[in-house]
Image (spheres, grey):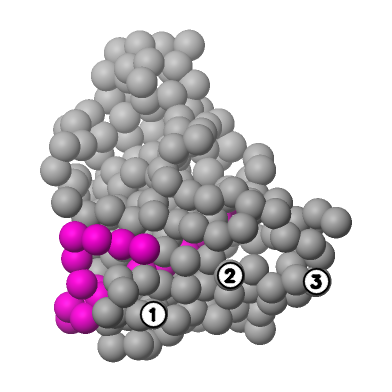
């Protein structure tokens, strides 16, 4: 059974750096074409894709957030970490990690974590 | 900001058919396949359709997807109360070099 679980702080202050961890099981990020994505949803708004990391450490970022995001993986721990710098109240959202495989649209993000809610406030 | 445009809302009575459109461009829908997600508030999004029209195991055949040119659509036939949710299309965008989601459509069962 494939599962993903997000963890991180529920509250961060403006200008701080957010670090989120996605811990997964049931698959390996060393398997060819496998990848993990980060997606967020601000309250009342649409889903927004943030970043992805492939099995071979290839990384892609949202164009609008690229300068603030860093994604990394620890294959031995089955974890993917997303950091977002210079947090702002507009970054308040539920953050999800999701598995996908194959390039491009591929086969879709087929398994998602339950999400972790992050509030940015002083 | 979303580059895939969906109607904000759609509705129908139980048993009716509802269709949701997703309009993109040559750099996303026009050059790659489309996936659809169902999202109920407070829960994880669920993959509903992948590669334009394929259904993952467990997704009822009441849900169907199609694509033509730079647009795609999701149809829900035999609408049920549990279909009340937000629906998002998504695709890879070659210009942005990343995934893009649609603006989302809230489906209401009257």
Q: Is residue B5 above or below residue B87?
A: below
Res. B90 image quadrant: bottom left
Tag 3, which secondary structure?
loop
Q: Which residue is mark 1?
A: A73
Asked if the stretch drawn in magenta spans residue B24, the answer is: no
* Observer able to see residue A90: no
Q: Is residue A87 above or below residue B10?
A: below
| B73 relative to A1 in the view: left or right | right
Q: Position of residue A8 (x, y in %)?
A: 55, 60
Verify CB contact (< 8 Å) between mark 1 and mark 2.
no
| Sequence order check, earlier mark of 1 and 3 | 3
B56 or A8, nearer to the observer: A8
> Residue shown at 49%/79% (left/top)?
A71
Chain letter for mark 2, please: A
Residue at 38% x, 16% y is: B81
Q: Chain of mark 1?
A: A
**Residue drawn at (36%, 52%) of the image:** A112
Q: Nearer the viewer, residue A88 or B94?
A: A88
**Residue neighbourhood size for the residue with mark 2, other residues' Cα within 10 Å, grouped as few (<14), some (14–19), many (≥20):** some
Q: Which mark is residue A15?
A: 3
The segment highlighted magenta reads A23-41
State yes or no: residue A32 in magenta. Answer: yes
């Amino acid at each position: 059974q494939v599962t993903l679980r997000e963890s991180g702080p529920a509250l961060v202050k403006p200008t701080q750096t957010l670090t989120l961890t996605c811990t997964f099981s049931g698959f390996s990020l060393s398997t060819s074409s496998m990848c993990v994505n980060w997606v967020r949803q601000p309250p009342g708004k649409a889903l927004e894709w943030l970043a992805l990391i492939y099995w071979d450490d290839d990384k892609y970022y949202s164009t609008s957030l690229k300068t603030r995001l860093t994604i990394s993986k620890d294959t031995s721990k089955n974890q993917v970490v997303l950091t977002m710098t210079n947090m702002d109240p507009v970054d308040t959202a539920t953050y999800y990690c999701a598995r996908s495989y194959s390039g491009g649209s591929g086969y879709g993000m087929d398994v998602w974590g339950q999400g972790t809610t992050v509030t940015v406030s002083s | 900001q979303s580059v895939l445009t969906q109607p904000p809302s759609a509705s129908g009575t139980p048993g009716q058919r509802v269709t949701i459109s997703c309009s993109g461009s040559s750099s996303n829908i026009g050059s790659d396949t489309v996936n659809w997600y169902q999202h109920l508030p407070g829960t994880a999004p669920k993959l509903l359709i992948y590669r334009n029209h394929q259904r993952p195991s467990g997704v009822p055949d009441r849900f169907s997807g199609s694509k033509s040119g730079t647009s795609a659509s999701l149809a829900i036939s035999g609408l049920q109360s549990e279909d009340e949710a937000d629906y998002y299309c998504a695709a890879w965008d070659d210009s942005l070099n990343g995934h893009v989601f649609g603006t989302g459509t809230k489906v209401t069962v009257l």
